[in-house]
Image (spheres, rainbow, N blue to C red):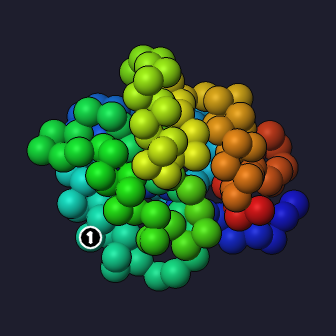
Amino acid sequence: MTEAKPVPVILVDDDPDEHFLFKADLEDAGVDFEFNGFTRPEDAMEHLNARASGPVLVLCDLSLAGGDALAFIRDTQARLGGGAIGVYSGARNPEMEEKCRSAGAMFYIVKPVSRAKLVDALAKSGKLSLAEQGNGRVILVAG
């Protein structure tokens, strides 16, 4: 078992049902994590500004009510604490994926999220990974 401190996960999606589904999908996949969901990007940014230092994983939906996902991705870079930001979307869109990467996103996950998709995305980030906790459970850690 690892003694690493778990990295919190923040999901920014204007649909609260997506917060529930995201959390349930990862919990069912054996991922234990601290989760914060926000429907508005400005609330997520306020949370990021107020939190203690350290890495965080931020997943941002492309369709943010009253917000611009690309601007949010750019504005979040300095607040990741060595963590990563990625896109969480309902459909693959190579053109938009490239724009997201140019804005600073490290990966693009197509819903629904799964352990395999998360492992792949984290490998692409090079900053976060999953660490075994025993009994098939894992936590998100830096490194």
Task: Give the camera-side residue of 131 and 105.
Answer: 105
Q: Residue furthest right?
A: 1
Q: Position of residue 45 (x, y in %)?
A: 30, 65
Local crowd size for mark 1, using a 10 Å CA cut-off: few (<14), some (14–19), many (≥20): few
The residue drawn where x is 35% and y is 62% is 75
Residue 74 image-quadrant placement = bottom left
Task: Give the camera-side residue of 9 and 1.
Answer: 9
| Quarter containing the N terminus | bottom right
Q: Residue furthest left?
A: 66
The residue drawn where x is 35% and y is 37% is 61
Residue located beneath label 1 in the image:
46
Question: SS at mark 1?
Answer: helix
Q: Position of residue 9 (x, y in %)?
A: 50, 55
Q: Is residue 67 left or right of residue 87?
A: left
Residue type at mark 1: give it: Glu
Q: Position of residue 16 (x, y in %)?
A: 25, 38
- Residue 107 makes an appearance in the image: yes
Task: Give the camera-side residue of 8 and 100.
Answer: 100
The residue drawn where x is 58% and y is 46% is 106
Q: Position of residue 18 (x, y in %)?
A: 34, 32
| Quarter containing the C terminus | bottom right
Q: Is residue 135 left or right of residue 86?
A: right
